[in-house]
Structure formats: structure tokens, C-alpha cells
Image (cartoon, grey):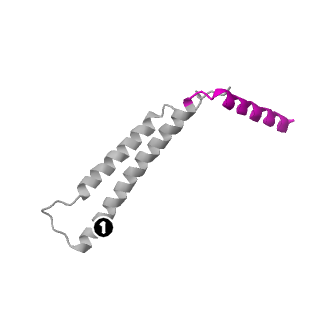
Amino acid sequence: MRRLASCPFLGRRRDAERVATLLDKCHALRQQLEVSREQVETASAEAPRLLYFALTGSLETALVRAMEDVLTVLRHASQPLGPIGVEWLDRQDRALKRDDE
């Protein structure tokens, strides 16, 4: 049976730290782009600020969603295959061996 121990994606703490840093930067930038109630802007000054505010919010949302998807995949991949999964892997191995002959 194939093991997940050799999976290159497990234990990638540095990648998780990079994503966390990106999230922190997006959040800090969005806070800077928020308009204060005392600040009065012209429409031409407000448009790029709103665009960047929306973009950073979208980036932050996409990063969080991607990390949630990665965790879901890793959780599913780390669960036992069960008898149907083992049977399917055996069929694939037999088919590959036949193709090699």
C-alpha cells in the first residue's frame, strides 16, 4: 500500500508562514485603505483607493479559501483508504504491470 509519508506537501511550515505573512500584509493594507469619517475625498481620489481595498480583500479571501482547501485535501489524503481504495490501487498496479510487459 502506498504511504503518505513521502508527500512533499506535509510539514511545509515555511510555506504556511509565508501565507500568514501575506495575509497580515493584506490586512494591514486594507486597514490603511479604509477611509476615516473625518477624511473627505474627491471621487477621483476615492476610486483607486476603493479598487485597491477590494483587491486586497479579494486576495485575502482567496488565500484563506486556498489554505482551507489544502487542509481539506490533506485531511482526506491522510485518512485510511479502506477496502475499496486498496482494491482500486491494486487494480491500477496490475494494469501498470500489464502495460510494462
Residue named by callout 1 = 48
Q: Which residues are magenta?
A: 78-101
Q: Secondary structure at mark 1?
A: helix
Determine whether 82 is above or below 47 in the image: above
Q: Image quarter for residue 94?
A: top right
Residue 43 rendering spot, x and y as whole percentages: 24, 73
**64 to the left or right of 25:** right
Instruction: Decide: is 71 above or below 48.
Output: above
**Left or right of 14, for residue 90:** right
Question: What residue is drawn where x is 32% and y is 45%?
Answer: 24
Name the foreground residue: 82 vs 74: 82
Identify the amino acid type marked 1: Pro
Q: Position of residue 26 (x, y in %)?
A: 33, 51
* Residue at 15%, 64% in the rendered image: 39
Residue 1 drawn in magenta: no
Where residue 74 sits in the image (x, y, percent)?
52, 35
User: Which quarter of the picture shows residue 95?
Assistant: top right
Magenta region includes residue 100: yes
**Residue positioned 48% across, 31% down in the render:** 11
Question: Measured along the vertical axis of the image, is residue 39 above or below residue 67?
Answer: below
